[in-house]
Every structure is written in structure tokens, then in C-alpha cells.
Image: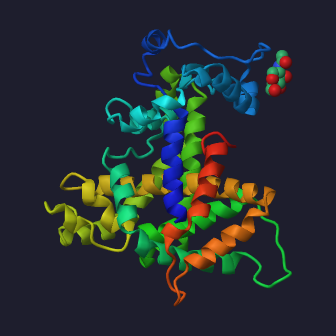
Amino acid sequence: MTLHFGFVAAAVAAVLIFTWIRRIYDQDKVERLLAHVPTHVFADGNNSRARYISDLRTLLESGYRKYNKRDQAFKISIPIGGYSVKYRVVLPKNHLEEVKHLSNNVFSWQLASRVIFAQDFTGAPDRGAWSGKALRVGIHQNLDGITSQLDARINRHYELNLPQNKGQSATINMMAFFVPTVTFVTNAVLVDSRLSSDPEWLQRTAEFAVNRYGAADDVRSWPPYLAGLVAPFIPSVRRLQEQRKYVMRTLKPVYEELNAKSQLSDNDKAERRKGMFGYEWLWSGSPNDVTLLDFSDTMMRTLIAAIHTTAKTISVAFVDLLAQPELLTDLVQEAKDAIDPDGQNIDLNKLIKLDCFLKESQRLSPVFLCE
Ligand SMILES: *[C@@H]1O[C@H](CO)[C@@H](O)[C@H](O)[C@H]1NC(C)=O
């Protein structure tokens, strides 16, 4: 469930942020294309980078009131360094359905993330156009099976990392606690116990998720025309390359196993959905003959995409819950009611209040807007 909400969070964030960055290298063209969209700036004239970092929410909110409420779009500058997306366009809500249904070659999160995360320079794994869909479909089709697996895994992690006796307490830093938690849990869905119980694999997967963002930041501090020259020497970029090789090396046996069972090349796509773990059912929508590089890059991207979005979503939700402890009674009661009589399974469809609570939490603090 945790994972599921993470991907939903990522998808919602992708739509919410509305990054219009086609042909980003061609800034003039972007400039011309966006000329008719008003640029919204801080009213007091302080538009420094520090201001954007500390006060973006105010800017978005005033832009929302000034433009979006009147069904108009506006754009804001993104002063994040030399190599950067120059603008973000924030569309009014009535475009949501249209944007959600635009095809990938018109409005592409894949292309956007290549630019935002400076992918061409960091060498972070690109992701096939099909894998987002494969993941969503796979997760939904396997949700029931996944849920009990996750439940056991989460309990185990909490037992190991949180005080278990009544009256005991501990202090946690939300992200420092939830990044390893989500890494531990996500791996239980994506890979089987050979890897999900391997401490090195767990540590490395948490690390490369962090490092991927770090590498993007480091590249973006250079102007685009220098980024390509400098990138191969940036330590975080080198580490990312090394991590990518590690993933490929480690996944090779698993890949060969699936290949031997023709699960990666069978024309019958339903055949590919078989299996309990992500590494087995991820390929249902993929083209035939997934290569080892596709395989390991997709797995790596999936982990990168899952870990931080989910950790952030949960951290924010916990803070929201702490601020309104009166909600807890209802949420706990709902959770109790959703457990079937033999105490084995949870009916996720009954967790309506929890679902609403998480959606509201995400609406108020979209994962891409909180630091
Ligand atoms: C602009 O805003 C930033 C962030 O709030 C602040 O640190 C900086 O001092 C401001 N600059 C001026 C000239 O007021």
C-alpha cells in the first residue's frame, strides 16, 4: 500500500507541477512558445534564488489566486543553477483531465525528468516509455498479494527499529527513518528474498536513490555547455555510474533466469505477468526481448522513483497526523474494521478515510514542493 501511494504521489506530482519543457535546450524557442503566458514574480521585487528556495509556496499561491482562479495559466522562473529548466508553467485546474490524457509524445514525464534530473549528463538510467504503465498495471493487479507481503515486512522493520514496549519512546528524523524503511519495504515487492534480505543490496539501493538527486544537483550547477565536459569528473556522477554497474552485475543472474523461462521474450504478454515480485511482472507491457541493460535500468529507476517519493509522502502524512491527533481514532477504527475475521488480510478498499487523508495530505504538500 505504501508503495502504491508513492507511485500515485509521483504521478500526481508530475501532473501538478506541470513542467513545460519540450525542447528545453532551445531556450529561445521555449521563450517564444511561452511568451503569451504571464510570468509571475514576487511582488516586492526580490526574486533571488534564495527567495525561490525559501518562499516558493507563497509565489505559487499568489499566482494561483491571480491567474489560476480565473482559469489562466502563469509561469514562474526556476533559478536552480546554470543547467536548468527556465520556467515552470502552472495550469489552471480545468486543464487537469486534458493533461492527464495527453500522449507521451506531447506531454512526457520521461522527457521532463531527463531534463530536470540532467539525465544525459549524470548517466542515470533512462526508463523505457512502457515501464510506468507496466508498473501501475502490475501493482494494481497484484495489490492483494502485495499487501500482506508489505504488512509483514513493515511490521518486521518497525520491530527492529522502533521501541516495542508501552511507555517507551524514541526520537526519529522522518526522512532518515523512512528512506531505509521504504527501501526495505519496496525491495520486498520488487525482488525476491535473495536480494531483499541482502544488506549490501538494501544499503546500495537507498544510496543510489539519494545519489541520483545529488548528481543531478551537481551537474545543474554548471551551465549546459560545460555540463557535458565536466560531468564525467564529478564524484557523485562517477558514483552513480558505478552504482548502475553494480545493479547490472547483481541482477544478471535473475535476468538470465527469467530469460531461460522466456518470460522476457514471450509474445504472450499475460505470461509475463506471472510471479509474485516486481522483477517478474514488470515486463507485461514491455517490448519483446528486454535486454539486460533495460532490465537493470528499469529496476534501478523503479527503486529511485519509489523510495524518495514514498518516504516524503509518509513523512508529510505523519506530520499532518501529529498536527491533528483527533483523526487517529477514526483511522485506527477503520483499519481494524478492514481486517478480515481471521486476522490475515486487509481489505484495502475499506480504507476510505485513510485514502482521503493521504490524498488531502498530498494535495496540501505535493511531494515535489516540500523540502
Ligand atoms: C531576498 O530574499 C531572501 C530569502 O528570503 C533573503 O535571504 C534576501 O536577503 C533577500 N534579499 C533582499 C535584497 O532583500
Work out whether residue 329 or residue 371 is closer to the camera in this orientation and state it.
329
Work out whether residue 250 or residue 275 is closer to the camera in this orientation and state it.
275
Q: Is residue 94 above or below residue 135?
A: above
Q: How is the image coloured?
A: rainbow
Q: Residue at x 42, y 12 (%)?
A: 29
**Residue 86, visible in the rendered structure:** no
Q: Report x, y in % for residue 85.
A: 53, 25
Q: Is residue 205 above or below residue 28?
A: below
Q: Residue at x 56, y 63 (%)?
A: 352
Q: Residue furthest bottom?
A: 342
Report the label total.
Answer: 0
Q: Report x, y in % for residue 199.
A: 55, 73
Q: Which quadrant: the C terminus?
A: top right
Q: Is residue 10 above or below residue 4?
A: above
**Residue 245, visible in the rendered structure:** yes
Q: Report x, y in % for residue 224.
A: 50, 23
Q: Is residue 136 above or below residue 126?
A: below
Left or right: 229 as drawn, with respect to 312: left
Work out whether residue 147 or residue 342 is closer to the camera in this orientation and state it.
342
Q: Report x, y in % for residue 213.
A: 57, 44
Q: Residue at x 79, y 63 (%)?
A: 325
Q: Residue at x 57, y 49 (%)?
A: 211
Can you tell which quarter of the image residue 329 is in?
bottom right
Left or right: 165 as drawn, with respect to 160: right
Can you tell which quarter of the image residue 48 is in?
top right
Q: Residue furthest left?
A: 267
Q: Which quadrant of the render holds ligand 1?
A: top right
Left or right: 27 as drawn, with respect to 295: right
